[in-house]
Image: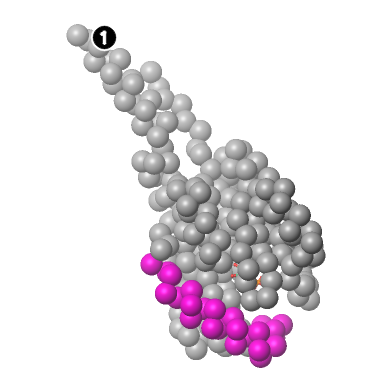
Amino acid sequence: MGVCMERKGLLIVVSGFAGSGKGTMMKRLVEEYEGYALSVSMTTRKPRPGEVHGREYFFVTKEEFEQKIREGGLIEYAPYVENYYGTPREYVEKQMAAGKDVVLEIEIQGALKVKKRFPDSVLIFVLPPSVEELYRRLKNRGTETEDVIRKRMSRAAEEASMIGRYDYIVINDGVEESVRKLHSLIEAAHSSPGGNEEFIRGIRDGLEQLWKGEK
Ligand code: 5GP
C-alpha cells in the first residue's frame, strides 16, 4: 500500500531591483544545486557587452516579440524601461513536466501574472542590504547611462510598494548565504499541502481501505 510519488516541479519566480544581485544568485543556484532549470527570457533590449543570445536572453526585434505574443508563445510579458520582456512557454512547460523547478527571473508585473495563472508558484523578492549599496552596484556595473540608471531607480521605488504581494524576501548581503537561503525556501515550498495533493490523496485512500478492511 506504499504511496509512490514523483516530485512535482515548481515554478519559482524571483524578482528584485536592478542591481540587487539577483542575476548572480540565480546562476549560482543552478550551479550549486540539482533539479533547477533557469528560464531564458525574450527581450527587445539590446545585448550588453558579454551577453549571449540564448544564454542571458533571446534578443529579438519588436516585430518578432509581437509575433510571439500573437502565437500565445509567452507565459507572461511586460514592458520595462523602454523595452519588452517575456517568458517563452515551451521551455517552462517541458522542464516542469520533467520534474524540474523552473526559475523565472522577472519583474513584478510579470511575477503577479504568473501567480494568478499558476497559484502554486512561489514568488521571492531579492533585496539589497541598503539603498546606498543598490545605487553603488548599479553605477559600478557601468553598462547603463546615468539617465537609464535614474529610470531604473525610479522603477525600484515603484516596485518597493508591491513587495507585500510576494511569498518571501531574501536580503542579498552575500551571495553564498543568500543562495543557501533561496534554496531552503524552495525546499520548504515543496512541503506545502497544495503541492503534494496526489501524495495526500494516496495516504487518505490507503487509510480508508485499511479501515474498511479491518471492519
Ligand atoms: P535587464 O534589462 O536588467 O536584464 O532586466 C530588466 C528587468 O526585466 C529585470 O527586472 C528582469 O527581472 C526583468 N525581466 C527579465 N526577463 C523578463 C521576463 O521574461 N518577463 C518579465 N516580466 N520581466 C523580465
- Residue at point 45% right, 80% down? 129
Q: Is residue 64 visible?
A: yes
Q: Secondary structure at mark 1?
A: helix
Q: Is residue 122 left or right of residue 155?
A: left
The N terminus lies in quadrant? top left
- The one nearer the camera, 18 or 72, is 72
- In the image, residue 168 sits, relative to residue 206, either above or below, namely below
Q: Tell me: residue 164, above or below residue 212.
A: below
Q: Ligand 1, what quadrant?
A: bottom right
- The stretch drawn in magenta includes residue 127: no
Taking the spot 24% from the left edge, 15% from the top edge, the residue there is 211
- Range of the magenta residues? 141-164
Residue 74 locus on image (x, y percent): 66, 52
In the image, residue 6 lies at what x, y percent?
Answer: 51, 33
Tell me which residue sits at (60%, 87%) in the image: 150
- Of all residues, the one furthest to the left in this rendering is 215
Q: Is residue 92 left or right of residue 197?
A: right
Q: Nearer the viewer, residue 89 or 186?
A: 89
Please say which color scheme the image uses. Answer: one colour
Name the residue beneath numbered marker 1: 213
Q: Residue at x 34, y 26 (%)?
A: 203
Mark 1 neighbour class, 10 Å CA radius: few under 14, some 14 to 19, many 20 or more: few
Query: On the image, which quarter does residue 41 sit in?
Result: bottom right
**Magenta residues, dominant SS class:** helix
The location of residue 102, given as percent across then percent down, is 58, 50
Type of amino acid under label 1: Gly
